[in-house]
Amino acid sequence: MDKIQHKQVDVGGLNLHVAEIGSGPTVLLLHGFPEIWYSWRHQMIALAEAGFHAIAPDFRGYGLSDQPSEPEKAVYYDLVEDMAGLLDALGIEKVFVVGKDFGAAVAYYFDLCHPDRVKGIVTLGIPYMKPGGKGNWDSAPKGLYFLHWQEPGRGLADLGRFDVKTVVRNIYTLFSSSELPVAEDGKEVMDLYNPSIPLPPWFSEDDLQMYSSLYEKSGFVFPIQVPYLCSKRDIGGLANFKDRTIQAPCLLILGTKDYFLKFPGVEYYVNSEMLKSCVPNLEIKFFPEGSHFVQEQFPEEVNKLLLGFLNQHQ
């Protein structure tokens, strides 16, 4: 970890924090929520040792990156263009893109908008979904965390009842389960937390402290906007690209115990011709017992898959 370097990069007037290690072909690592650059700690070291240049930014509004002036107007396209601007600032033309959780969406959308800059895509936990596509929300439980946090002000109020460290602990514990986080009537998502349940064995108190210190800096205003609230708004600049297919070679890594597979229609979609038609060069690998945080839970196994893909397509 001490070998990972950190710097701030000016991208369109916002300073984005970037963790960086290694030299060689560049791999751009995009975090999800409640993750941060640190969620790629195991992958960054392995990539550098295998001859790759790993860069893991904090998205705008996350961790050590600057907050945008109007977070309530944020859309995914902002993050896509931030990544293009970041690569320009670093003098990097083409990359492999690796995305986790909503970072997977940013990875795919980056390819839609800048296909000439993408060598290949690896995503964890989330398959490609067309920007602006309609989910099967009518059949979703009304207490589903995603629906709760899509209501303006509700997610921030829910998280705001607790200190940052408690919020991160709660979410990591809840989202490591194979069950969908669904709140009862009259309850909020954070009320689902059971203090008798320990942190996952692969997530230490030191890890918790690192995440907490980063979110102490950024807070949760922007993290609630993206990916939750912005998903209810228009898709901005992505509208011009939404009907393109993903032509880059792609690898999707899913844990069989990932709660996301229980979202309405997701498991069917992952195995459907519909997904294959949108991402024709896609390979899917399932991790038995893998949770939503599979790259932290099984780092050595994920690294082996990741490096195998990168070496095949570089």
Image (cartoon, rainbow, N blue to C red):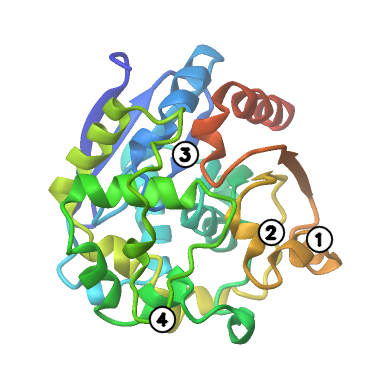
- Left or right for 227, reference 156: right
Q: Quadrant of residue 276?
A: bottom right
Q: CA distance from mark 1 to mark 3?
A: 24 Å
Asked if one can make out residue 278 in the rendered structure from this viewpoint, the answer is no
Few, some or many residues within 10 Å of mark 2 (<14, 14–19, 20+): many
**Residue shown at 75% from the left, 66% from the top:** 269
Give, as a three-letter code, the residue at label 4: Asp
Residue 128 location, x and y as percent?
Answer: 64, 61
| Between discs 1 and 3, the one toward the N terminus | 3
According to the picture, the residue beneath numbered tag 4 turns out to be 185
According to the picture, the residue beneath numbered tag 1 turns out to be 276
Asked if disc 2 and disc 3 are in contact, CB closer than 8 Å, the reply is no
Residue 246: assigned label: 2
Give, as a three-letter code, the residue at label 1: Lys
Q: Secondary structure at mark 3?
A: strand
Asked if one can make out residue 267 in the rendered structure from this viewpoint, the answer is yes
Give, as a three-letter code, the residue at label 3: Leu
| Between discs 4 and 1, the one toward the N terminus | 4
Q: Nearer the viewer, residue 289 or 216?
A: 289
Q: CA distance from mark 1 to mark 2?
A: 10 Å
| Between discs 1 and 2, the one toward the N terminus | 2
Q: CA distance from mark 4 to mark 3?
A: 41 Å
User: Does residue 269 sit above or below 195 in this rendering?
Assistant: below
Asked if disc 4 and disc 3 are in contact, CB closer than 8 Å, the reply is no
Q: CA distance from mark 4 to mark 1?
A: 38 Å
Q: Nearer the viewer, residue 270 or 313?
A: 270
According to the picture, the residue beneath numbered tag 3 turns out to be 28
